[in-house]
Amino acid sequence: MKIIPLLAVTLFLAVVAQAQPLSQIINPQQSTPPVAGKELVNYLIRVDWKDPKGDPKFLEVLTTEGGFELDTMQKNSVKINNNDVPVTLKFTGTLTDATDKKCRLQMFLGRTVPYVTGTSGLGSSMASSYSQMQVGLQSTFVVKFDKPVVIQNDENGEISVLVKRMD
Protein backbone atom coordinates (compact mmCIF):
# COMPACT_ATOMS: atom_id res chain seq x y z
CA MET A 1 0.00 0.00 0.00
CA LYS A 2 2.94 2.36 0.57
CA ILE A 3 3.99 1.92 -3.05
CA ILE A 4 0.97 3.81 -4.44
CA PRO A 5 1.81 7.17 -2.72
CA LEU A 6 5.47 6.72 -3.75
CA LEU A 7 4.43 6.11 -7.38
CA ALA A 8 2.11 9.15 -7.26
CA VAL A 9 4.94 11.41 -6.01
CA THR A 10 7.32 10.02 -8.64
CA LEU A 11 4.76 10.56 -11.40
CA PHE A 12 4.10 14.12 -10.18
CA LEU A 13 7.85 14.94 -10.18
CA ALA A 14 8.23 13.50 -13.67
CA VAL A 15 5.41 15.72 -15.00
CA VAL A 16 6.86 18.82 -13.29
CA ALA A 17 10.35 18.06 -14.62
CA GLN A 18 8.96 17.88 -18.17
CA ALA A 19 7.24 21.27 -17.79
CA GLN A 20 10.22 23.27 -16.45
CA PRO A 21 13.97 23.31 -17.18
CA LEU A 22 16.04 21.45 -14.60
CA SER A 23 18.01 24.61 -13.71
CA GLN A 24 14.75 26.35 -12.74
CA ILE A 25 13.63 23.43 -10.56
CA ILE A 26 16.99 23.31 -8.74
CA ASN A 27 17.47 27.09 -8.45
CA PRO A 28 14.45 29.16 -9.61
CA GLN A 29 16.27 32.51 -9.14
CA GLN A 30 19.13 31.49 -11.44
CA SER A 31 17.26 31.53 -14.74
CA THR A 32 15.86 34.75 -16.17
CA PRO A 33 12.54 34.82 -17.97
CA PRO A 34 12.48 36.07 -21.57
CA VAL A 35 11.49 39.68 -22.13
CA ALA A 36 7.88 39.62 -23.19
CA GLY A 37 6.91 41.77 -26.15
CA LYS A 38 10.45 42.90 -27.03
CA GLU A 39 10.42 44.04 -30.63
CA LEU A 40 13.08 42.61 -32.92
CA VAL A 41 14.97 45.26 -34.89
CA ASN A 42 17.95 45.41 -37.21
CA TYR A 43 21.07 47.42 -36.46
CA LEU A 44 23.41 48.94 -39.01
CA ILE A 45 27.01 49.00 -37.76
CA ARG A 46 29.33 51.27 -39.73
CA VAL A 47 33.08 51.41 -39.15
CA ASP A 48 35.07 54.29 -40.69
CA TRP A 49 38.84 54.53 -40.68
CA LYS A 50 41.13 57.24 -41.92
CA ASP A 51 44.59 56.24 -43.06
CA PRO A 52 47.02 59.20 -43.12
CA LYS A 53 48.43 57.90 -46.44
CA GLY A 54 45.18 57.07 -48.22
CA ASP A 55 41.53 57.70 -48.73
CA PRO A 56 38.97 57.17 -45.95
CA LYS A 57 37.55 53.64 -45.87
CA PHE A 58 34.46 52.09 -44.32
CA LEU A 59 32.48 48.91 -43.93
CA GLU A 60 28.86 48.35 -42.94
CA VAL A 61 27.15 45.32 -41.45
CA LEU A 62 23.41 44.85 -40.93
CA THR A 63 22.60 42.55 -38.00
CA THR A 64 20.12 41.90 -35.24
CA GLU A 65 20.95 41.78 -31.55
CA GLY A 66 23.54 39.08 -30.94
CA GLY A 67 26.64 37.94 -32.75
CA PHE A 68 27.96 38.89 -36.18
CA GLU A 69 31.02 38.03 -38.27
CA LEU A 70 32.44 39.48 -41.48
CA ASP A 71 35.54 38.25 -43.33
CA THR A 72 36.39 40.21 -46.47
CA MET A 73 39.31 41.61 -48.48
CA GLN A 74 40.55 45.17 -48.77
CA LYS A 75 40.35 46.79 -52.19
CA ASN A 76 44.07 47.61 -52.20
CA SER A 77 46.60 44.80 -51.98
CA VAL A 78 50.28 44.83 -50.98
CA LYS A 79 52.94 44.30 -53.64
CA ILE A 80 55.71 41.80 -52.85
CA ASN A 81 58.10 41.14 -55.78
CA ASN A 82 55.54 42.46 -58.26
CA ASN A 83 52.91 40.08 -56.88
CA ASP A 84 49.68 41.42 -55.39
CA VAL A 85 49.14 39.95 -51.93
CA PRO A 86 45.60 40.49 -50.59
CA VAL A 87 44.94 42.09 -47.22
CA THR A 88 41.94 40.56 -45.45
CA LEU A 89 39.61 42.31 -43.00
CA LYS A 90 37.88 40.62 -40.08
CA PHE A 91 35.01 42.23 -38.17
CA THR A 92 33.31 40.14 -35.48
CA GLY A 93 31.41 40.90 -32.34
CA THR A 94 28.26 40.88 -30.29
CA LEU A 95 25.70 43.68 -30.10
CA THR A 96 23.45 43.88 -27.04
CA ASP A 97 20.59 46.38 -26.86
CA ALA A 98 20.92 48.23 -23.52
CA THR A 99 18.30 51.01 -23.69
CA ASP A 100 16.28 52.75 -26.38
CA LYS A 101 19.25 55.12 -26.90
CA LYS A 102 22.33 52.92 -26.32
CA CYS A 103 23.79 49.51 -27.02
CA ARG A 104 26.78 47.54 -25.79
CA LEU A 105 29.18 46.51 -28.54
CA GLN A 106 31.88 43.88 -28.03
CA MET A 107 33.96 43.63 -31.17
CA PHE A 108 37.15 42.64 -32.93
CA LEU A 109 38.27 44.65 -35.96
CA GLY A 110 41.43 43.43 -37.61
CA ARG A 111 43.31 42.75 -40.80
CA THR A 112 46.10 40.57 -42.05
CA VAL A 113 49.40 42.27 -42.83
CA PRO A 114 51.77 40.46 -45.20
CA TYR A 115 55.49 40.68 -44.50
CA VAL A 116 58.57 39.22 -46.19
CA THR A 117 60.14 36.30 -44.33
CA GLY A 118 62.93 35.55 -46.78
CA THR A 119 64.29 35.93 -50.30
CA SER A 120 65.90 33.47 -52.65
CA GLY A 121 67.18 33.33 -56.22
CA LEU A 122 69.96 34.82 -58.28
CA GLY A 123 70.25 38.15 -60.04
CA SER A 124 67.02 39.47 -61.53
CA SER A 125 64.99 36.36 -60.69
CA MET A 126 64.71 36.99 -56.95
CA ALA A 127 61.66 35.59 -55.17
CA SER A 128 60.34 36.43 -51.74
CA SER A 129 58.52 34.23 -49.31
CA TYR A 130 56.08 35.92 -47.01
CA SER A 131 53.77 35.31 -44.08
CA GLN A 132 50.76 37.17 -42.81
CA MET A 133 50.15 38.44 -39.31
CA GLN A 134 46.73 39.43 -37.95
CA VAL A 135 46.57 42.79 -36.18
CA GLY A 136 43.55 44.56 -34.76
CA LEU A 137 41.51 45.93 -31.91
CA GLN A 138 39.45 43.88 -29.45
CA SER A 139 37.25 46.02 -27.20
CA THR A 140 33.86 46.42 -25.52
CA PHE A 141 32.13 49.77 -25.23
CA VAL A 142 28.77 51.54 -25.11
CA VAL A 143 27.53 53.30 -28.26
CA LYS A 144 24.74 55.87 -28.48
CA PHE A 145 22.57 55.21 -31.50
CA ASP A 146 23.20 57.56 -34.47
CA LYS A 147 26.31 59.11 -32.85
CA PRO A 148 29.75 58.02 -34.08
CA VAL A 149 32.35 57.25 -31.42
CA VAL A 150 36.12 57.19 -31.97
CA ILE A 151 37.41 53.82 -30.77
CA GLN A 152 41.05 54.19 -31.81
CA ASN A 153 43.21 57.18 -32.69
CA ASP A 154 46.96 57.03 -33.20
CA GLU A 155 49.68 57.81 -35.74
CA ASN A 156 48.24 55.17 -38.07
CA GLY A 157 44.88 56.92 -38.29
CA GLU A 158 41.48 57.08 -36.64
CA ILE A 159 38.74 54.46 -36.38
CA SER A 160 35.14 55.30 -35.49
CA VAL A 161 31.97 53.24 -35.08
CA LEU A 162 28.37 54.27 -35.71
CA VAL A 163 25.37 52.11 -34.79
CA LYS A 164 21.94 52.91 -36.21
CA ARG A 165 18.78 51.26 -34.99
CA MET A 166 16.69 50.42 -38.07
CA ASP A 167 13.07 50.59 -36.88
Image: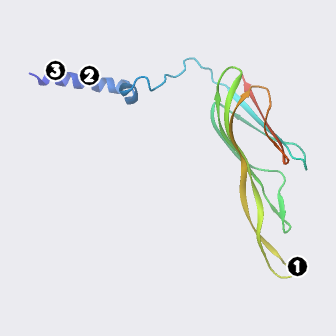
Q: Quadrant of the N terminus?
A: top left
Report how far apart the C-alphas of labels 3 and 2 lie in the structure: 10 Å
Q: Position of residue 8 (x, y in %)?
A: 20, 21
Residue at screen point 66% across, 39% down:
93
Q: Amino acid at mark 2?
A: Phe
What mark, if any, has residue 5 been given in the picture?
3
Q: Amino acid at mark 1?
A: Ser
Tag 1 secondary structure: loop
Q: Nearer the viewer, residue 148 or 155?
A: 155
Residue at screen point 70% across, 24% down:
102
Near mark 1 (Cα within 10 A), the count class, few <14, some 14-19 or many ≥20, is few
Tag 3 secondary structure: helix
Query: Above or below — where is 28 with respect to 78?
Result: above
Instruction: Find residue 60 and report its image quarter.
Output: top right
Side of 111 relative to 96 (left or right): right
- Which residue has dot 2 on it? 12
Tag 2 secondary structure: helix
Q: Position of residue 122 (x, y in %)?
A: 83, 82
Farthest residue to the left: give it: 1
Query: Above or below — where is 30 with respect to 92?
Result: above
- Which residue has dot 1 on it? 124
Q: Are marks 3 and 1 in contact (CB under 8 Å)?
A: no
